[in-house]
Image (spheres, rainbow, N blue to C red):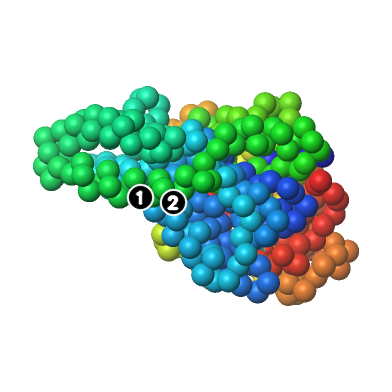
Amino acid sequence: MAAVVLIGSQWGDEGKGKITDFLAEKANIVVRYQGGNNAGHTVIANGEEFKLHLIPSGILYPDKTCVIGNGVVIDPKVLLDELDHIEKRGIKTGKLLISSNAQVIMPYHWVLDGLEEEARGERKIGTTKRGIGPAYQDKVSRIGIRIIDLLDKEEFAEKLRSNLVEKNNLFVKVYGQEALKFEEIYETYLGYAEQLRSMVTDSSLAIDESIRSGGRVLFEGAQGTLLDVDHGTYPYVTSSNPIAGGACIGSGIGPTRIDRVVGVAKAYTTRVGEGPFPTELLDESGEQMRANGHEFGTTTGRPRRCGWFDVVIARYAVRVSGISDFAIMKLDVLTGFDTLKICVGYRVGGEIIREFPQSQKIFRQAQPVYEEMSGWQEDLTLVRRFEELPGAAQNYILRIEELTGVPATLVSIGPGREQTIVRGGIY
Ligand code: GDP
Ligand code: IMO
Ligand code: MG
């Protein structure tokens, strides 16, 4: 197996960082293909915790090449700070390559993210305010600044100047704010460019060459299926394509190159930000999940909304990404519940639906139809083989496999690398 895509199967924060780090051991290249520093991927390596926002989670292995692909929106300051932070902690990092075609998040994108959210009022999305949406807007509007533009003083000056005319018009005339100054931004970003220059390359070519020569490539998705701008709970989504197809677009490789798709899913469900969530628990069971699972956002620190596992969502993720294997995460967090619920369909009006609805109006009304299973009381965090899990925990995983039709090849019972039950090979 050469190329594996790893995606979030729910609303993000499934544990992609942990599984990327786990699988990266056997990979040569790890690639981020979409999103930006709205992501927060936690990796615990040799007992130390790292929170990565932009750099692929393979960076903690000194011999891995990491790639930030063309589909990513890069805030250069965040990237440089992140590199600096890891190096200062004494970690010998792998080699980092940056696609010359990746888009740059500019200061006006952060400002706009805040202003647009405020203007939405009650209908706010609950964005991370990192400028992600506005940066992707500019990309699609064909006025975005790419990393390659930053490396060329004249090109950058021209693009920045024309962007600022438009953005300052908006700030001053529509939002009544102060205009941003060209010189300040220009000088600062040219400084970033010099620090990044040696890493910038045609990363599509580097990935293709590796695959052709028998290398193993791991694509690390950010966010999750239901945050996908096309396939998610629109408009309560991010502005990129976290699903597996996004890996091709965001890195410049073709779909025939991909051998396997790993869907990372929590053994329950969480969501940060606004939008519908049928299995959300607003009672003490939800509190118990949040407390046991430390469910607070890695990027913004917001409490994550918690609820039961939703098979309608999992099956939908299987469909839109062609998931071949599940990594079921945080099974240990469900210890202590007498009964567990799995949502197998939605009641909408008088009907029961089993496929994820196209209409968000219908999704908003969806009432979960649950199947109940026995829980377990044993601590799972020291278990290393599937057969050592309590019977009820094994049954829970087996039932998820049965309902989704996809093997749970990896089962995670703690944040550490070693707290991973392997039931089959991925590479
Ligand atoms: P990502 O955005 O998908 O990479 O996920 P996050 O890092 O935002 O959130 C997942 C959190 O769960 C992190 O704090 C991980 O350290 C932690 N984690 C991952 N797997 C497990 C697990 O199996 N059990 C427990 N208890 N924590 C886990
Ligand atoms: P990882 O990679 C969870 C959510 C935000 C908001 C919506 C849009 O750690 O799984 P944006 O700033 O992207 O415009 O916000 O998407 N969101 C995430 N939720 N995990 C993430 O990333 C997220 N990235 C964005 O909370 O609801
Ligand atoms: Mg996260």
Identified at 75% across, 56% down, the residue is 25
Residue 142 is situated, as x and y percent measured from the top left of the image, at 37, 24
Residue 377 is situated, as x and y percent measured from the top left of the image, at 73, 74
Residue 169 is situated, as x and y percent measured from the top left of the image, at 15, 33
The kind of secondary structure element at disc 1 is: helix
Please tell me the numbered disc located at residue 195: 2
Q: On the picture, is 250 further left or further right than 273?
A: right
Q: Say which of 129 and 268 sits in front.
A: 129
Q: Say which of 131 and 206 sits in front.
A: 206
Identified at 15% across, 42% down, the residue is 179
* Amino acid type shown at disc 2: Gln
- Is residue 230 at least partly visible in the picture? yes
- Is residue 339 at least partly visible in the picture? no
* Amino acid type shown at disc 1: Gly
Is residue 60 depicted above or below 96 in this figure?
below
Identified at 21% across, 30% down, the residue is 166
Ligand 1 shown in quarter: bottom right
Residue 38 is situated, as x and y percent measured from the top left of the image, at 45, 50
Q: On the picture, is 138 further left or further right than 354?
A: left
Alpha carbon separation for disc pair 1 and 2: 7 Å
The kind of secondary structure element at disc 2 is: helix
Hey, which quadrant is residue 328 in on the image? bottom right
Q: Say which of 278 and 62 sits in front.
A: 62
Callout 1–callout 2 Cβ contact below 8 Å: yes
Name the residue that disc number 1 marks.
191
Please tell me the numbered disc located at residue 57: none
Hey, which quadrant is residue 318 in on the image? top right
Identified at 57% across, 34% down, the residue is 202
The 10 Å Cα crowd at callout 2, few under 14, some 14 to 19, many 20 or more, is few
Q: On the picture, is 222 further left or further right than 234?
A: right
